[in-house]
Amino acid sequence: SHSVKIAAGAVVCVESEIRGDVTIGPRTVVHPKARIIAEAGPIVIGEGNLIEEQALIINGYPENITPDSEVEPKTMTVGMNNVFEVGCVSQALKIGDNNVIESKADVGRNVILTSGCIIGAFCQVNTCEVIPENTVIYGSGCMRRVQTERPQPQTLQLDFLMKILPNYHHLKKTVKASHT
Amino acid sequence: MDGCGSFTVHHKRPPFSSAVRLFQAASGDIKTSSAVSVAPDSASLCGEMASLLQPDRAVYLVRGEKKIRAPLSQLYFCRYCSELRSLECVSHEVDSHYCPSCLENMPSAEAKLKKNRCANCFDCPCCMHTLSTRATNIPAPLPDDPTKTAMKKAYYLACGFCRWTSRDVGMADKSVASGGWQEPENPHTQRINKLIEYYQQLAHREKQERDRKKLARRRQCMPLAFSEKYGLGTRLQRQRSGAPISSLAGLSLKEGEDQKEITIEPAQALDEVEPLPEDCYTRPVSLPEVTTLRQRLLQPDFQPAGASQLHPRHKHLLMKRSLRCRKCEHNLSKPEFNPTSIKFKIQLVAVSYIPEVRIMSIPNLRYMKESQVLLTLTNPVENITHVTLAACEEEDPDDINSTAKVIVPTKELVLAGKDAAAEYDELAEPQDFQDDPDVVAFRKSNKIGFFIKVIPQKEEDADVTVSFKIRHDFRNLAAPIRPTEEGAETTAEAIWLTHHVELRLGPLAP
């Protein structure tokens, strides 16, 4: 099914572009000009996520080539309390909780983010690996280190945005998921 | 169709980042600010157009102790010697110290005491960024009534870049915002201080003996200036490179006072060393825990091998420096004292005195075929400048890099003066210079575009280089105007300066 299911309590601006089979959980904020594109499979986004402007979450065909034969569509899952900052590109198939993908970062398809990971600004991570918990990737050489505490969920920011955004933007209507 | 739609979506990047990447590819060094002046008519940020304006395409030769080729934007001009100077043929002197994050000025004596570090700011031991202080609210028991708890603020240091916090190394949160953070003390400080005192005394005694020998009569007059060890600030001290040096001798000038004899024990060699732990070879290495060499060496006192012992250090001060011509000892560049100001008190840079040659457009260059290259020449001074170009002679010792023959215009080129008010003055008549259209392509206020003919001489040339001499008149406004017998001369005399210029024109067309 090619429909967008937005749970109650989510704030999704009309100017955002959502295509394909996308499920958005409650308390998630999707800014205008964010793009969530599910073309090679559905995308399921959990609760409490913050997807900022010009962020791109795409479940696309690898290397942009449409396969001739039927490939089984893989679901992309995004957990809770993640932050996708301005201009980032995320193609990771599995993202856990409390991760932060900073501005203009690029996460490849074969990366699996667990929890508490921070991909620094402009870092391009296109390896084929599972990033361990609480890892911080920073710097132009994508240096890594492990932090002792995970990043705090942006509850204050989410509450503020959920109050203010409807004052300035039209929101997409809530569509209940048909199979829940 | 979904397939076509996905194609465009995937390649559509935010426009800014692609332009930034192309710029990074074109300009090897982003820090040279003069490279990024893209004129509005060539606003397409494609790599080719911007790369012609790169500063290192047109270099000038500096005839100093070493022959240095550098773009004009990186050179200085000593108007007393009337010569170009590069960073390597001037002497650099420290002007003032300041902290780069809090911009606090510090006098040199205080900087020396604090080991050139700021008192307020800290550096992240992990990524060397500046640490910022963050506050959290923690419940803490009130001092009057232990049963009730109130919210108190606790402060900790955090790095915004790599997310390091002071809690990672076990430093407790402080209750004061600033001033509570202490650097760990070096266990060897006492021994080092004692050694320093002993050698200070020794140096002082040596200095006194030397002074007594040299100045038999004038004892008290100038002890410091004459025999200051390690004193490389003034010219007198610099020239005496053979003399033994020590910066410690000048600190105490108590002559005649009987100073306490300081003795030190010599260092003792130990027979037994701590053995390595047993699992040294078998324990698997946990990479996030190991510090990098850079992180380790930034703390030379401890050089911790584990990341859990990396403590933050105070931020290093930066300094403002002034440059001085080595021949005539005049200042070429003197910055302002205030750290927030980027202006200069004295700024004798070459671009404000010497006409600048820049490449404007290059046609396809072919082996042994003559092509016309368009160059621009800009006049930085306010009076009219006459420029003559000349090709390098056959056995010119400066001409080592050129790989092509060049035919420069033989006529003298006249450049109008730089008039700041010209754009506002609508009634001004355009000056008529009677340019030869074969030589001068265009003329625009103080800039002209002219053609040179280039014949590449090498078959497989990756970078066609041409060189020629440029001769222009320079009015020295710094020299005193001597009244002649016929009457007072109102204009300064013009002298003719010749510079050797090399241009890199890029590869031959395939």
Image (tube, rainbow, N blue to C red):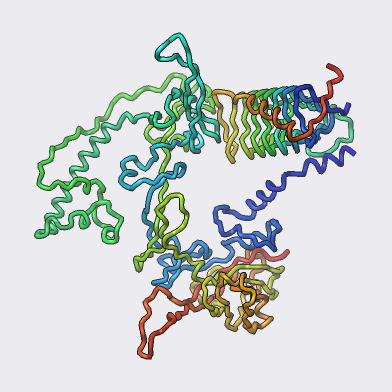
Residue visible at 60% across and 26% down in the picture? A151
Residue visible at 42% across and 20% down in the picture? B277
Left or right: where does residue B70 sit relative to residue B330? right
Left or right: where does residue B218 sit relative to residue B319? left
Report which quarter residue B214 is drawn in: bottom left
Residue visible at 52% across and 68% down in the picture? B60
Report which quarter residue A23 is drawn in: top right
Q: Is residue B79 above or below residue A39?
A: below
Name the residue nearer the viewer: A53 or B87. Answer: A53
Q: Is residue B248 above or below residue B235?
A: above
Q: In which quarter of the image is the N terminus of chain A?
A: top right
The answer to whether residue B354 is visible is yes
Q: Quadrant of the C terminus of chain A?
A: top right
Image location of residue B57, percent across then percent down:
59, 64
Q: Is residue B431 above or below residue A136?
A: below
Name the residue nearer the viewer: A31 or B307. Answer: A31
The answer to whether residue A132 is visible is no
Name the residue nearer the viewer: A148 or B458. Answer: A148
Image location of residue B370, percent across then percent down:
69, 76
> What residue occupies the far top of the structure in this picture?
B147
Residue visible at 60% across and 33% down in the picture? A137
> What residue occupies the far bottom of the structure in this picture?
B486
